[in-house]
Every structure is written in C-alpha cells, then in structure tokens.
Amino acid sequence: MSKYPYQNPELSIRQRVEDLLGRMNVQEKVGQVNQHLYGWECYKKEGDGIVLTETFTEHVAWGGGIGALYGLFRSDPWSKVDYSNGIKAVDSWKVTNQIQAYIIKNSRWGIPALIAEECPHGHQGLDSISYPTNIGRGSTFNPELIQQTSELMAQELAAKGVHLALVSTLDLMKDPRWGRSEECFGEDPIVGAKMTEAIVKGFQGNLIEDQTDFLDASVLEINKSSQQIGVILKHCIAQGEAQGGHNSGTVPIGTREFADVYTPLLHSTRNAVGVMAAYNDIDGVPCHSNRVLFEEKLRNEQGFQGIVMADGIALDRLQDVYESQTEAAADALAAGVDLSLWDETYTKIEAGVTSGIIDEEDLNNSVRRVLAIKFLLGLFEQPFVEDPSKKWATLFTESKKLNKAVAKESLTLLKNTGILPLSDNGKKIAVIGPNAHNIYHLLGDYSAPQSEKQQEKTIFNELKQQFVHSEVVYAEGCEIRNETKQQEKMAKAIELAQESDIIIVVLGGSSARNFDMEFLRNGAVTSKGINMDSGENVDVASLSLGGKQEELLTKLARLKKPIITLLVQGRPYDLTRVESLSDAVLLAWFPGQEGGKAIAQTLIGENNPNGRLSISYPRNSQQLPVYYYQREASKQENYYDLSGRPLHEFGEGLSYTTFTYEDLQTKMNIDNLEVSVKVKNTGSVAGKVSSLVFVKLYGGAVIQRKKLLKAFRKDLLEPNETLELTFTLTPNDLRYMNVDNRWHFAKKAKIMIGDLSSEIHCDW
C-alpha cells in the first residue's frame, strides 16, 4: 500500500504531481528546478569504487534533493575526465544507483533525480558510440535510419541509468562561419523537423503523443519500457541566425520570417520530454526570458507538454538585461524556463519568493512540469537500473553496424571524372593530409576520449585493410591550421607521392579539443587550439582551408597523378581550388568512429555514395548568405566581382549511377494535394536516391521565397528499375504569413522535383 497518494502508480500523473507539490516547502521546490552541479564533480574514484564529494552532498542538503544532475559521465578536456579518473560504460549503472540512492535517502519525500547527459551525436562518455555529426546525418536525407540509431542511443543511455539525452536538432546552418554548424542537420527547416521527429520517436517511442495529455494517464497506462528515455532538444530557437556567424549572437529576424522558417521546427518538438532554450535573443528578447516563445508559441500553439531547460549559465547572462539575478529568475520562471543549468540565478529563487519579487505560482508551474516528467519516466517506480552486462555485447555490435550505415549515407560526392570507384589492383596509393591518420579529427565537438583500439580506426588504417592487394602508404603533409615548421612535412609527402600511382588527400578542419585548452564556465573553448577550427565558440571569418593545405594540394597536383580529395569538416570550406586540382572530391563531414571504414568501402565501390547536400555550398564567405530559400526579391544576384550562386546547390550529390525523373502529376484529394513522379535508375549499379519535393508559392502581397522543401524520401533502386513515388502535401505545406501577420493559404504554386515542375491552382 502506498503511504501517500503521490506514491500510488494507479493515480494519474496529474493527481500525483498535485499531491506531492502540496507537501513541499519552498526550499524543496527550488531544489527541483535547479541543475546546478557539474556531474563529474560529484564523485571521486578510490580503488575499485567511488566516493561522493562534499560538493554533491552539500547541494543535496541545500535543495532538499536535486531536480536534475548533468554530466555524471561526461568525459572530455573541459571536464578533465579521461580513462584515468572517469567511469567506464560497463560501470555506469553502479554509479547512477549510488548517486540516486543518496538523493532519495536525503530527500524528505524520496524524490529521485533526473540524470542528464550530452548526446549530440552519441553519448559524450567513455566507451560510447560516436556517430557522424548532424551536418553529415542531414546529408543522408534518411529519417528512418536516424530513428533507428536514436533507438540504440536510448538503449545505451538507459543501460547506464540516464533519463535525459541532450540532443542537438533545432539549429539551422544559415551562416557556416558559425562554429556550431556541425550540430545542424543543414539549412532547411523541413529536414531539421523530420530529423527531430525521428529522434524523438527513437528515444521516447510513444511516451508523449499528439492530442493526448499525458498528465491524465497513470504510469501503468503509459507502460514505459526500460529502453525509452526522454530527449531534450537543443536549442530553442533560431541560434543559427546569429548575425555574422557569431556564437550566441543577436538574432534580428522579424515575426514573419520567424513564423515561416521556425514553425515547422517548433512543431517537431511537440512530443519531446523537453527543449533547451537557446543563448541568443530574438529581436532583442533573450530566449531565456521569452514568454511569447515558450508559453504562447511552444506550449499553447504547438501543444508542447515537456520541460524547458536552460542552457549552461545562460540564466546568469540575463544580467545584461536585468538589474538583479532575482529579477532575472522571476522573468525566466514566468517565461516557462523550468530547469537551470549550472547558473547562480535559480539559486536565488527562494529569496525572490520571500521578498515578493517572484510569484510562487510561477515556481509551482515549473516544479509541476519537472515532477511530471519524473513520473512519466518512471523514476518513482524504478529509480534504480539493473546490471546491463548481458546486453552490452549485442548492443554495441548493432550500434557499430548502424553507425557505419549512417556514415556511408552521409558521404557526399561532389566531383568524379570517372576515377571512382578505385580498383584494388596492386598499385601504390599515397594517403596524405592532416585528417588522414587521427581518429579525433573524424568525431566532431562534444566527443569523449577514445580507447586505444578505437584510435586505430583512422582513414589511413581502414584504407590499408580495404585495399589488401595494393600498397597503401601515409604522410601527414601538413597540419590543419599551423603554418610553422610545415615544409619538412610537405617535402616528405611530395616525395612519397612521387613514388605512388594514386594520391588520396585528406583535408578539412577539426573540432578536436585537447586537455591543455582553456574553457568558459559553460564548456565553450576560449583558447585557440592551433589545429582546432570548428566547434562551440570557434567561429571563423574566412572559409578558406587552414594552414598550408591548399599549398600542399597544389604541389601534389604538379606531379600530374590522379588525385582524390576527401574533406573531413564540420562546416563548408572554399573548394574552388580543391575541385580544380582534384579528379574526385568526396565530402566526409565528421563521419564518426566508423567513418574511416565507410570511406574506404566507398572508394573501392562496396558502397555507392548517396549523400546529398543539406546546405547550399558557398564559394567563400564573401557571398554569404547563400541558403536557397531566400525571398525572390528583384535584386542583382551577382556581385561585380563574384557570382551570387553557391558553388553547389542544396540537394546536390553524385552517385556511381544516374537517375532520371519523369511523369510528374498533381491532383487534389479532398483537402490535400497528391504529388506523384516516376524515378528511374538509368545506370549499371544499384543506388539510393533522395527525391526532394520543392514548392514555390505565388501572391499574397509579400515577397515569396524562391522555393522551399516540403517533402522528401530515400529509395534503393536496382539498375534500370523504375519506381513511382507519391507525396501528400497538406494545406499547411502551401501556406505563408501574409502582410497582416496571419497565415494565408496560397491559391497558386509550383511543384518541383528534380528537373520537372508543374504549376497548380489550389481550391482550399
């Protein structure tokens, strides 16, 4: 028998929340909305076990418990956690249980804590799976594959006792100078929204569903499985719009632009357990105090039922707007920010309630939402995790398999004179470049230290294993950005290339941090890594390749030997010279732990490249912005000294086969528009094709966009196979915000797929 109603799993979550909330004092309520601790500072390894630190135990006492604990297993140069002092994956569950047991014992009402971990492209913990970063995953145009990998990430985190995965999905890459471009699925809101929905489904299953208020169900009715965990989507919202590509910069877009571009992304969050507020402002109003954004647009308009988590120390940055932290806390609570992250601001709430500056009902609303998520995720019924040791082998085998599948589908071929695929015919292959033989350069930002075995999975090593009948040799050639003492490295590379038949050059950038760097309180790097030119807080003014990379390629080209250039990168770099000097150019993005193998299998022809650009690829930074859905204003597109068109259009990507489209048909079906088209593989090998449906709207007393993606799908076609595709567009796919800031349905539109188009008149 339950002692109190909140302990009764047969009651609705709403009833349990209200009962528990009514028993709590202000101190305990404040404890539930605080995520003040750095998780890695809560324990110390001693022998074969761990001890809890005073930092941890004192904070539990301060809040009468803990709302959430971030980064218990985070491992990276900022946290200073590696294999010497961190927690291996197989031991994570023990630590979670130890932490949870202490919190429950020292909470008057036995309230468990939410364990939150970074998972932007896989868990940022030791021995974890690190997938391609989002800029590559967006190029797959395959939400089904992203959902499958999200399910595996959820299983991995659940086995460690984690409840919340913090996943980047909501940012758009509108300015590639921004260091966090790698965290974006691309520039397109529909691609971002579809990928977001796939991630929510993968992590959470049906925990929260459309048109259903989970508060009215009991945990018995929800029947959550042990493999479902909550996802916190980052960042809400418009962070990629910051002026000049500056991290955390100001976003001056207006109401109409915001509505047209970001409504699909807001809608995609509706069933997520939570979102993380973005650092930026929108037209001068910080997201962390933006009541219109969270209460009106997110909760009321989109039906979002989850929590809003602050970004790291972002609430303290509100001091730029407010005279005191107490006032900042009052407005953030009123705006619907439910859970802090490392800041001091939410530790001032109790004083604010006492002084009357903070309305206790605003605090209560946030506590309600935090408690509701704890009930939803089953923390009160199952606060501890069972030994997962029997699951690890199968889980990691399947994860590595799908990890490689994502890497393969992310690879984007931009040029091929016919040199690819290569034959393993006994020739000598020189693998040269700063990204050819370092696993950390393949992983992207928010990555953990890698095991010695994992560090062997470089592009060079994987090429050696794949081309068993050829001689594969390596030289670094130059570093990524460092320009000093590079001539000797370059000379060795040229000498090696002279003796070779084929040259594979691996250029690009890196987000790899090191333990000598300095960091802000939120983990963003502040000291320039000599060869780190991408990642959080690493914005660039120029998109030129760093260091001596172009010089190296130029000297190699003078040898008049076939050159295949691979670009490992988190943002686009200027490729005009690279393409002119190369026989083939393959974008690998940051392809993750299995990226080297995926690249090797693609170069030899075991994988037919099928990635397509989820961005408009600029020529250089001087022509920005180049995102494809700009408004079709009557302007001079070209500059006096440079084309206004991107180097490569959104959706471009070559294959080892070719595809054609024919017979585009459209018809109204009740309230929807049915679009059909036939696609044919006209080549000699099987391949996957991503079919993109664009819409251009007409009329409405506003300048319409050139076009905007509304639907897409990916299919595998055998040689000479024809497949008929059908897409359903709803009225919302053909609407825009008119001159009066009201949604308006277009009467005329153009539908475009491949090189086909059809104009339609709509009767809504």
Image (tube, grey):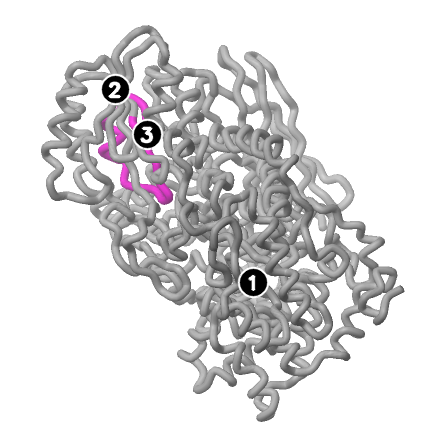
- Tell me where the magenta segment starts and ends, as one range: 565-585
Work out whether residue 727 or residue 540 is closer to the camera in this orientation and state it.
540
Residue positioned 57% across, 82% down in the render: 349
Which residue does the image show at 69% across and 82% down from the upper left?
25
Q: Secondary structure at mark 1?
A: strand
- Density class for disc 3 (Cα within 10 Å; few <14, some 14-19, many ≥20) is many
Q: Is residue 750 above or below residue 553?
A: below
Q: Which residue is mark 2?
A: 473
Label 3: state its secondary structure: strand
> Mark 1 belongs to which amino acid?
Leu
Reply yes or no: does residue 574 show up in magenta. Answer: yes
Using a 10 Å C-alpha cutoff, classify the residue at mark 1 as few (fewer than 14 neighbours), some (14 to 19) or many (20 or more).
many
Q: Nearer the viewer, mark 2 or mark 1?
A: 1
Give the Cα distance between marks 2 and 3: 16 Å
Most distant residue in the right direction: 1
Q: Secondary structure at mark 2?
A: strand
Whole-angstrom CA distance, mark 2 to mark 1, is 47 Å
Q: How many numbered circles does the render carry?
A: 3
The residue that disc 1 covers is 69
- The amino acid type found where label 3 is placed reads Leu
Quadrant hosting residue 718: top right
Q: Are marks 3 and 1 in contact (CB under 8 Å)?
A: no
Spot occupied by residue 444 in the image (x, y as percentages of width and height): 40, 44
Disc 3/disc 1 C-alpha distance (Å): 40 Å
Q: Earlier in the sequence, mark 3 or mark 1?
A: 1
Residue 583, given in percent of the width and then of the height, sits at: 28, 21
Please state which of residues 690 and 98 is positioned toward the viewer in this rendering.
98
Hey, what amino acid is under mark 2?
Answer: Val
Q: Is residue 556 left or right of residue 267?
A: left
Residue 90 in percent (x, y) is at 56, 42
